[in-house]
Image (cartoon, grey):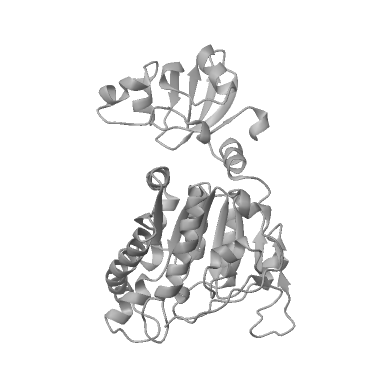
Amino acid sequence: MTTKTKAPVAQSAARPEWAKAKRIVVKIGSALLVDRASGRLKSEWLASLMDDVAALAKAGKDVVLVSSGAIALGRHTLKLPKGPLELEQSQAAAAVGQISLAHAYQEMGQARGLTVAQVLLTLGDTEQRRRYLNARHTVQQLLKLKTIPVVNENDTVATTEIRYGDNDRLSARVASMVSADCLVLLSDIDGLYTAPPASNKSATHIPLVRAITPEIEAMAGDAGTELSKGGMKTKVEAGRIALAAGTNMVITTGKVLHPLRTIAEGGTCTWFLAPSDPVTAKKKWIAGQLEPRGSVSIDAGAEKALAGGKSLLPAGVKAVTGNFERGDAVIIRSLDGRELGRGLAAYGRADAERIMGKRSAQIAEILGYEGRDELIHRDDMAVGRSEGRP
């Protein structure tokens, strides 16, 4: 049974990072969704969260939910013992609980005029380049269609060696993958403290973190309940991933109704501020941290289009070199050999050679499948020194 908890009194107006965020990823832990005593879904709390999500969607914001809860719900249905579960038991519990969890989100979404989609990921889907691109394009298409993706780790097939094990880090990877402006970690505590407040009464709340230093890492405690594998330590690790991707992160309490509205009202929380926005961070990553696997040479018309912020279409490509696959970094060169920029190829070397110099409308006929219109999309490209190239 959900307890009606009043939201904390607002400490100040919400930070501008919240108001300006156009794409928000929200992580929801098992302990917030599932009642420990009964093993049942906290329907009232979830309803209040979906009210908040509906309000954000109405305001024109994209929202992605990263939700735990499947194993916690499934273990109750299967009457599994308390305490740590064996891998096979966890997988069985996830298979049973995922149906209930997905249905709850779908039902509550429909009641608020929202279309909800389920996306199950494994570690490999965010670590292996081609699978990462497939997952990213799927989630981005869902958002384009004004759908609320509900992401969870695919615990029915993930093993100990190939899984995240907590949704804090998974949510940070998802936020990075979709270039989110803000990642919200709903916790059982209203932010980061100088020490675990449950065991140290002199601990003080930290409202703002601009860099994750060894001192900040030292403040994080260990994991908490049997329902939730994440603790403050994993949240700080998630912050490191998010900030590197240009995504701001906020840790706030989820033990209140309407937790997202509480952020908007300036409730107590800890903000981790990224040094740059997602687009700039991604372009710097492309420009300076990825090893190029090949190059494409383009004509003067394409060079002018790139300088104007356009994507690189196959029609402007005159030559292709190297041995690259879809998603690999390539150097973009002028016909006289100047490096113009770098980007992530939407096609591998073989297909790129087949479509170079051709109109985008011809791609499906040439390759036999519907691909992207661009050889390199402008969002996957860093052009010139101003975007981070050495």
Q: Is residue 79 left or right of residue 243?
A: left
- x, y (%) of residue 261? 56, 63
Specify the quadrant that holds the N terminus.
Answer: bottom left
Rendered view: 60 above or below 346: below
Given residues 256 and 345, the one toward you in this image is 256
Q: Is residue 45 left or right of residue 97?
A: right
Residue 318 visible from this viewpoint: no
Count of labels in the image: 0
- x, y (%) of residue 249? 60, 58
Q: Quadrant of residue 352?
A: top left
**Residue at left 48%, top 24%?**
312
Q: In this view, does 312 lie to the left or right of 382?
A: left
Rendered view: 172 above or below 365: below
Residue 220 visible from this viewpoint: yes
Rendered view: 367 above or below 140: above
**Residue at left 70%, top 57%?**
211
Q: Is residue 85 left or right of residue 195?
A: left
Given residues 206 and 296, the one toward you in this image is 206
**Residue at left 37%, top 60%?**
109
**Residue at left 62%, top 45%?**
277
- x, y (%) of residue 380? 51, 35
- x, y (%) of residue 48? 47, 68
Specify the quadrant that holds the C terminus.
Answer: top right
Rendered view: 113 above or below 159: above
Q: Quadrant of residue 356?
A: top left
Q: Quadrant of residue 14?
A: bottom right
